[in-house]
Image: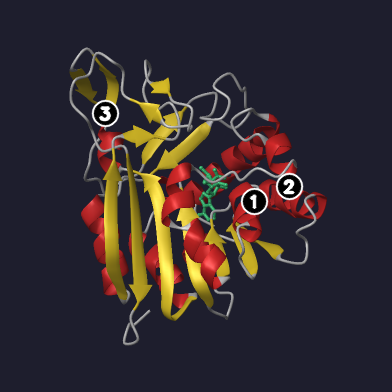
Amino acid sequence: MDEYVATNRRNWDERAARHPDTDFYDVEGFLAGESSLYPLEREEFAPFVERESPTILHLQCHFGLDTLSLARAGANEVVGVDFSSVAIEQARDLAAEAGLGDTAAFVEADVLDLDLDRSFDVVYTSYGVLAWLSDPDAWAATVARHLREGGTFYIVENHPVAGVFENVGDDTAELAHPYFADEPMMFDAQGSYADLDAEFEHTEQYEFAHSLGEIVTALAERGLRIESLHEFPWATWRMYEGMSEDDEGRWWLPDDVSVELPLTFSLQATKRTTGRG
Ligand SMILES: C[S@@+](CC[C@H](N)C(=O)[O-])C[C@H]1O[C@@H](n2cnc3c(N)ncnc32)[C@H](O)[C@@H]1O
């Protein structure tokens, strides 16, 4: 395992231990029957799950809340993958507690070299996944390798343009990070998006900037036909100070910013029958 993966995994193991107890992840609400999916996925993707009852591979599933919500939305089978052993253990416990142990399975693995030796109707991944991955082409190969021909790939993710800025407010923004980058960025900070005050022992993280073009091209080169690419001016977490949350869990730029920036994107693609993935 390379140094970047090992460092990130130490940090994610600690976050995974903390996150189920946060309001952000509302496990209690989930166990009472609520879906953890945001309105966007419920509108763009869940009707397909309900209608088609597909088998779903969920990449970077964290502790399984969305995976299990997809099971509840009507998936025939869900398999969640994450490299954090803590997250996978929590996901298995949560599946049992929610009575979804027969529909859901969880696998501990690095998505960049995942090979489950089978394919799925759908590969799904969401919010806060690509920045941890060094190699978009290896990621796209994993997606293609696990999709049956004609199968659907769906991703909803932080928009890479949003990663460039810090201190957004009063109609200005600091250009803080590169949009195009070959080298990882090292961050060393306490807290997480789900608990800003959390204190961790392993605070170092490596993040990788991937442009939208890099992401789309990696998928296209692995035999995926892009069906839609939507961009939205809101995030699902407080990306910048001063943002405000609406009652659907969407975070909007501060009121004193008069332009909209792309903060989230969703992409749907179909695996071509002639792809090389
Ligand atoms: C921000 S979380 C995804 C959150 C998910 N949308 C949710 O809200 O539950 C990112 C996840 O990616 C996982 N991860 C990071 N790098 C990974 C890798 N190389 N292989 C597999 N999982 C990885 C982390 O352990 C973490 O659970």
Q: In the rendering, at what x and y percent does residue 182 appear?
A: 27, 49
Disc 1 residue lies near ligand 1 with CB under 8 A: yes
Q: Given the image, on which type of amino acid does mark 2 rest?
A: Gln
Asked if the residue under mark 1 is in contact with the one under mark 2, i.e. CB atoms within 8 Å, the reply is yes
| Residue 90, numbered circle | 2
Q: In the rendering, at what x and y percent does residue 119 appear?
A: 53, 79
* Secondary structure beneath label 1: loop
Which tag is nearer the camera, tag 2 or tag 1? 1
Towards the viewer: 265 or 38: 38
Asked if the residue under mark 3 is in contact with the one under mark 1, i.e. CB atoms within 8 Å, the reply is no
Upstream in sequence: badge 1 or badge 3:
1
| Residue 151, numbered circle | none
> In 3D space, how far apart are the residues under numbered discs 2 and 3 (Cα atoms)?
34 Å
Residue 114 visible at all: no
Q: Quadrant where the C terminus lies? A: bottom left
User: On the rendered structure, is 245 left or right of 59?
Assistant: left
> In 3D space, how far apart are the residues under numbered discs 1 and 3 (Cα atoms)?
30 Å
Residue position marked by numbered label 3 in the rendering? 165
Q: In the rendering, at what x and y percent does residue 255 appear?
A: 28, 15
Q: Using a 10 Å C-alpha cutoff, classify the residue at mark 1 as few (fewer than 14 neighbours), some (14 to 19) or many (20 or more).
A: many
Which tag is nearer the camera, tag 1 or tag 3? 1
Q: Using a 10 Å C-alpha cutoff, classify the residue at mark 2 as few (fewer than 14 neighbours), some (14 to 19) or many (20 or more).
A: many
Asked if the residue under mark 3 is in contact with the one under mark 2, i.e. CB atoms within 8 Å, the reply is no
User: On the rendered structure, is 266 left or right of 168?
Assistant: right
Tell me what residue is drawn at x 62 percent, y 52 percent: 69
Upstream in sequence: badge 2 or badge 1:
1
User: On the rendered structure, is 252 left or right of 86?
Assistant: left
Towards the viewer: 41 or 141: 41
Q: In the rendering, at what x and y percent does residue 23 appear?
A: 63, 27
Towards the viewer: 12 or 212: 212
* Secondary structure beneath label 3: strand
